[in-house]
Image (spheres, rainbow, N blue to C red):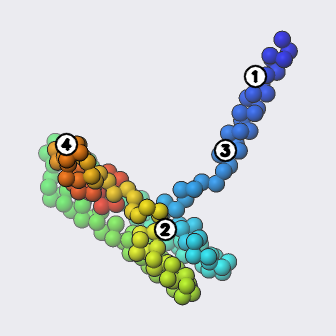
Amino acid sequence: MKTQKLIAPVLLIALFFATSAIMAQPRTFNDQNPDKPQHFRNLDLNDEQQDKVDVFFTEMQKQINPIKADLDEKEAQLNKLMIADKPDNQAIVAKVKEIGDLKTKIQIARVENRMKVRSILDENQKTRFDAMEMNDGPRKGGKQGRGQRGTGFGPEGDGPKADGNGPYGAGRGPNSGNCIYR
């Protein structure tokens, strides 16, 4: 009887430690954001270069975080305009232009950051960096998240003989970088 009473707490403690150990494992999907300093780790940066990359990243984040917050607000406003009983086309177009301007500001900040990083690299590192940029990052298997392609179901495709156009268009899906629905 005493043994059975001890088993439950011991199992709970063991389960706690097992989940803690699993959660403490390093994550392998950290390269999702190509702006993060870890994205550049395969360039074999020295300590001084890594410190500079960290500073560049922090400066960029300070610059784009308020823009991202404004972007989220503008997108919510756009959604509200679009679902109105009587949508105002001029207001919708104006909001889309505002959103486009904010996205352009973010992209410019990212490009400037990449150029800062490139400026501190030696020739070998620049070659690898440029190759990463041409391939849109060090991801294995090419670009990811490009939406529905291949066999699509819906108005544009119906199974194996589909032409690759899903309901969002060719290569455009809810997770693609060029999706108008973001």
- Pointer 4 residue: 158
Task: Answer above or below: position of 122 versus 109.
Answer: below
* Distance between the alpha carbons at the discs numbered 1 and 2: 47 Å
* Distance between the alpha carbons at the discs numbered 3 and 4: 42 Å
Q: Please report whichever mark, 1 or 3, sits nearer to the chain's N-terminal start.
A: 1
Say what amino acid the circle numbered 1 marks: Ala
Q: Residue furthest right?
A: 2
Callout 1 crowding tier (Cα within 10 Å): few <14, some 14–19, many ≥20: few
Say what amino acid the circle numbered 3 marks: Ile
- In the drawing, what numbered circle is on residue 8? 1
Figure quadrant of residue 91: bottom left
Image quarter where the C terminus lies is bottom left
- Pointer 2 residue: 138
Say what amino acid the circle numbered 2 marks: Pro
- In the drawing, what numbered circle is on residue 58? none
* Distance between the alpha carbons at the discs numbered 4 and 1: 54 Å
Say what amino acid the circle numbered 4 marks: Asp
* Distance between the alpha carbons at the discs numbered 3 and 2: 26 Å
| Residue 117, horizontal then vertical, whole percent | 52, 79
- In the drawing, what numbered circle is on residue 22? 3
In the visual, does 140 lie left or right of 15? left
Q: Do the residues labelled 4 and 1 touch (CB within 8 Å)?
A: no
Pick the front one: 175 or 123: 123
Q: Please report whichever mark, 3 or 4, sits nearer to the chain's N-terminal start.
A: 3
Figure quadrant of residue 14: top right
Task: Answer above or below: position of 170 versus 52.
Answer: above
Pick the front one: 49 or 42: 42
Image quarter where the N terminus lies is top right
Residue at 43%, 74% in the rendered image: 133
Q: Which residue lies furthest to the bottom in this view?
A: 123
Q: Which of marks 4 and 1 is in front?
A: 4
Q: Do the residues labelled 3 and 4 touch (CB within 8 Å)?
A: no
